[in-house]
Amino acid sequence: MADKKPESQFYTRPPKLGKWEALRIFLWNSETKQFLGRTGGSWAKILLFYLIFYVVLVGFFAAMLVVFFQTLDYKMPKYQLEKSLIGGNPGLGFRPMPSDSNVESTLIWYKHSDKGNVQYWQKELNRFLKAYNRSNNVHADKLEECRQFQPPQPGKVCNVKIDHSWQPCIKEAGYNYESKEGGPCIFLKLNRIYNWIPEYFNTTTMNSVDMSPSLRTEIKTAQANGQHQIVWVTCEGENVADVEHVGPIRYIPQKGFPSQYFPYVNQDGYLSPLVAVHFEKPKRGVLINIECKAWARNIIHNRAERRGSVHFELMID
Ligand SMILES: *[C@@H]1O[C@H](CO)[C@@H](O)[C@H](O)[C@H]1NC(C)=O
Ligand SMILES: *[C@@H]1O[C@H](CO)[C@@H](O)[C@H](O)[C@H]1NC(C)=O
């Protein structure tokens, strides 16, 4: 380059331009045919470079996503039971739940004679039980009326049929919230854990666990009839006073979750089994602390971590 430069040529100061003139020349320099300081060829090269750059970038991410999605299974979690974050110990849940505005609250409080008051709880239950109405289940064809302790046919799931035998824990009876004498129905469900298989108690294994004599008797009777493949459910008052106030309790349709509903492996149309707990004659006007527990050998009870048991309070005015 240096040899081409004529010796006589000195650097000359470019002519001093006005502000607007400089801008105009920057936008379009007709002498050098530069637009924004670059020639057409230069612009073409730079655009081509970025085009290729982004195409490669997008391609790279798309390839990575494809590789990632290859490792996913939409039906089955990768980390199951103890390996998963939620663990292999199912929790127990209750419905109806107090309103979202008070997430910490577990108090079910209403005035049985106040229609508006009662309606909130009934609506909550209607909403929760909607999924159990066959006409709302898009996989209704997969539902089977299973026999007790008999697993469903392959590709099917057992129906949870809430019919008139669940009286008064049905919509038509307002779940008994308006009853003058009797108490409400609270629905319990075991949280779904993929591929969790209950280890049912039997007369041998129940001895190593702290449980009430009445539950022991029940397990004994059930086993004698060959019907112990059930995750038992018990509800009781938490303190001495609560035990007295809570009164008799009925479990509908039975006192637990029978084996035909396990395991849950994300089957189409799967319904979590339910136990409707009917408080038949709870004391009015007092707060009653209630704890419900689910019983299987592989359910550990931990009140603080809300595992295997659930706590709520009942107050009926
Ligand atoms: C189920 O749902 C249908 C339609 O949504 C409704 O007509 C019917 O009354 C419901 N059945 C029960 C038992 O709630
Ligand atoms: C109870 O269950 C345990 C573990 O599943 C089993 O080893 C035992 O034989 C069972 N006992 C009876 C009496 O069924």
Image (spheres, rainbow, N blue to C red):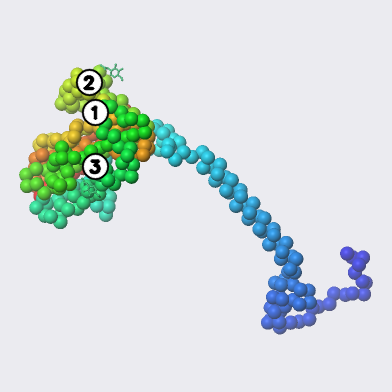
In the picture as drawn, the residue positioned furthest to the front comes out as 141
Residue closest to the eye, 164 or 63: 164
Residue 66 left/right relative to 140 = right
Earlier residue among tags 3 and 1? 3
Q: Quadrant of the N terminus?
A: bottom right
**Does the residue at mark 2 contact the one at mark 3 (Cβ under 8 Å)?**
no
**Does the residue at mark 2 contact the one at mark 1 (Cβ under 8 Å)?**
no
Are there few (<14), some (14-19), or many (20+) residues within 10 Å of tag 3? some
Q: Which mark is residue 226?
A: 2
Asked whether residue 27 appears in the rendered view, the answer is yes
Cα separation between marks 2 and 1 = 11 Å
The residue drawn where x is 16% and y is 49% is 109
Please name the amino acid that badge 3 sits on: Phe
Residue closest to the eye, 168 or 60: 168
Are there few (<14), some (14-19), or many (20+) residues within 10 Å of tag 1? some
In the picture as drawn, the residue positioned furthest to the bottom comes out as 18
What residue did someone put label 1 on? 148
